[in-house]
Amino acid sequence: MRVLKLVNGVMRGVESGDATVLTSPNGSRHHLKVTNEGVLNTTTGTVYNETLVIGVGGVSTGSPITLPNSETYLGQELQVELNSSVVELGSDYEYTGIGVKNEIAFTFDLVQGDEVTFTKVV
């Protein structure tokens, strides 16, 4: 993939590499990618980023976990981390519900003190 090269916030060329995510001072995130035609493709959005700490007794495999602050998602815009490590849809957790959702379920037990972080750009 080709990405925009920035030096001190100024475009300095296009290089091969991964997509870049920039966070501006107001908290909005900018996803920068360059298409095969060399045209800059950007998206900007408000970031939802909340962490849930698992309480006494933990959470059993397959039990639903509700996103904090009544947040909802449709699918791929949601990123989930467990104890600061990104977890994978399908092998580590599953979406629950149909359409607009507000829960996920892990494919293994969570223990007291585990931190689940939900991030999405809307």
Image: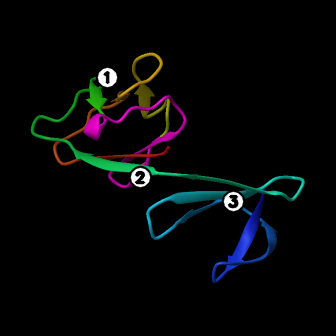
**Is 59 situated left or right of 32 in this image?**
left
Disc 2 residue type? Ser
Left or right: where does residue 51 sit relative to residue 5?
left
Query: For this view, does 38 lie left or right of residue 10?
Result: right
Q: Please tell me whether mark 2 or mark 3 is closer to you in this view.
A: 3
Residue 115 in view, yes or no: no
Residue type at the position of mark 3: Asp
Circle 2 residues within 10 Å: few <14, some 14–19, many ≥20 = few
* Residue 93 image point, x, y percent: 41, 31
Say which residue label 3 marks: 18
Q: Which residue lies under the disc numbered 1? A: 62
Displayed quadrant of residue 64 = top left
The CA distance from mark 2 to mark 1 is: 20 Å
Q: In which quarter of the image is residue 76?
A: top right
Q: 50 or 45, which lies in front?
A: 45
> Measuring 87% from the left and 52% from the top, which residue is drawn there?
36
Tell me the residue at 82%/53% (across/down). 35
Q: What stretch is highlighted in magenta?
A: 67-87
Q: Mark 2 points at which residue?
A: 85
